[in-house]
Structure formats: structure tokens, C-alpha cells
Image: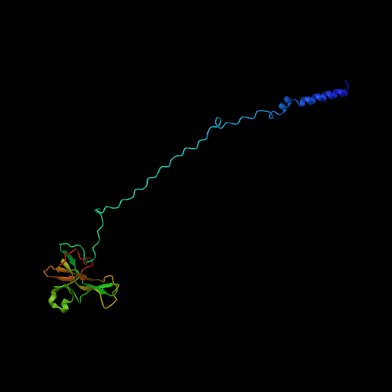
């Protein structure tokens, strides 16, 4: 066999060997290999469950306060208006304040016109109607017993004809009069304007 023929035979053998299916499979194992099994959603993979929902605890609504009972013993009572406080049968000791305004801020003892008791609830008995005057003057600090109250002529401790004392904190006026009894037995009416401020509101005295 010639060298040419030997070469041809060897070439043919090499070509055949390279194109054989077994060699191809060895060279490319993934070409005809069975595809990998996919994980089954029903068998291999564990089902994912949502986290359990914890129910929210309901917050109890704040109790609505109940309306106070109309029969409550602590129900406030209306404050009686000045000069009309609830009546009482007990006499009350009062203190005289025979003081008048002195300008815009000051008060002074009215030594020129001392307070006095009268038989009627009217002013100026001493000067104009002596018959209704009860003898004896009163001064600041004197104590008398009040037995009842009544409505009489308006009295003021200020100056109606002058505005100089309009802002004076001691300025006052009233139509309330008390029937008073002195320690020496005298009795008569006196305007509450001539008493200390705390004794001017009626004091719960009965009507005369």
C-alpha cells in the first residue's frame, strides 16, 4: 500500500471517530441529557403561609359621666341679692360707721352730722321734723341690736351734688333701714349706710 493510500485510510478513520454519537455525547453531555427536575410546588416546596394576624384589642370607651342628680345635697344655692338675705328671727348685733366720703379716696367721721335713730325710715328728722327724732347721737364703733328691716328713704354717705367722690371705694347708698335697739333702751330706725359695710346686706332680718 502506498503512502498516499495509508494517509487516506487514517484520515477516514479519524473523521468517523469524531462523528460517532458516543463521542458527541461525551463531548457535549448536556446536549441530550435529561433536563433537571423542577421542584414541585406541591411536594418539594413547603407552602408559605401568611403570618397569623393578631386581632387588635378593642379599647374600652371611657364611660360618659352621668349628669348630677337634681337631689344632690351639694347643689349650690343662689346667693340672695343684697338687702334681701333669708329672714331669721334672731336679733343681730351691728356696728355703727358714721363716716362720709372725703374726696376721691378718703373717708372721714361726720362729726357735724352724727347718726341718730328716728321713729320712721326717713332722713333729716333731726333737722326738719324733730318729732320723729329719737334723742341721742351715735358714733362710729357703737353697737346696737337689729331686730328687723324695712324699706325707707334713700340715703347716701357721699355728695350727690358733686362728682368728686364718684370713684371713692367707700361711697354707698341704700333704701334699707333697720329697726335698732340701744343698750339704754332707746329704739328706732337707722339707714344701713351708717353701719359698717359687712352689716348692710339685710343680715337675714325679718321685715318690720
Q: Vertically, is 149 above or below 76?
A: below
> With 184 as the anchor, is 49 left or right in this view?
right
Residue that protrudes farthest toward the top in the picture = 1
Residue 76 position, x and y percent, is 26, 57
Residue 143 position, x and y percent, is 17, 67
- Front position in the image: 145 or 137: 145
Where, quadrant-wise, is the N terminus in this rendering? top right
- Residue at image coords 13%, 75%: 132
- Front position in the image: 121 or 146: 121
Residue 200 position, x and y percent, is 21, 67
Q: Vertically, is 19 above or below 187?
A: above
Where, quadrant-wise, is the C terminus in this rendering? bottom left
Residue 166 position, x and y percent, is 29, 74
Q: How many discs appear? A: 0
Residue that protrudes farthest toward the right in the picture = 2
Q: Vertically, is 188 above or below 12?
A: below
- Front position in the image: 47 or 157: 47
Amino acid at each position: 500500500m502506498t503512502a498516499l493510500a495509508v494517509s487516506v485510510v487514517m484520515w477516514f478513520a479519524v473523521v468517523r471517530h469524531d462523528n460517532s454519537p458516543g463521542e458527541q455525547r461525551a463531548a457535549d453531555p448536556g446536549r441530550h441529557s435529561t433536563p433537571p427536575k423542577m421542584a414541585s410546588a406541591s411536594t418539594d416546596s413547603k407552602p408559605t403561609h401568611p403570618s397569623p394576624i393578631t386581632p387588635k384589642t378593642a379599647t374600652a370607651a371611657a364611660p360618659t359621666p352621668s349628669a348630677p342628680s337634681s337631689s344632690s345635697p351639694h347643689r349650690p344655692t343662689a346667693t340672695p341679692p343684697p338687702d334681701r338675705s333669708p329672714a331669721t328671727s334672731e336679733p343681730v348685733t351691728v356696728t355703727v360707721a358714721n363716716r362720709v366720703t372725703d374726696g376721691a379716696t378718703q373717708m372721714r367721721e361726720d362729726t357735724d352730722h352724727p347718726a341718730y335713730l328716728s321713729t320712721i325710715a326717713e332722713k333729716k328728722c333731726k333737722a326738719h321734723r324733730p318729732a320723729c327724732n329719737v334723742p341721742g347721737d351715735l358714733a362710729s364703733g357703737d353697737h346696737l341690736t337689729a331686730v328687723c328691716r324695712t324699706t325707707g328713704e334713700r340715703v347716701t354717705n357721699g355728695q350727690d351734688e358733686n362728682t368728686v367722690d364718684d370713684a371713692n371705694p367707700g361711697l354707698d347708698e341704700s333704701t334699707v333701714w333697720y329697726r335698732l335697739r340701744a343698750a339704754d333702751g332707746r329704739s328706732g330706725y337707722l339707714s344701713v349706710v351708717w353701719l359698717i359695710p359687712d352689716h348692710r346686706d339685710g343680715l337675714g332680718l325679718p321685715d318690720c
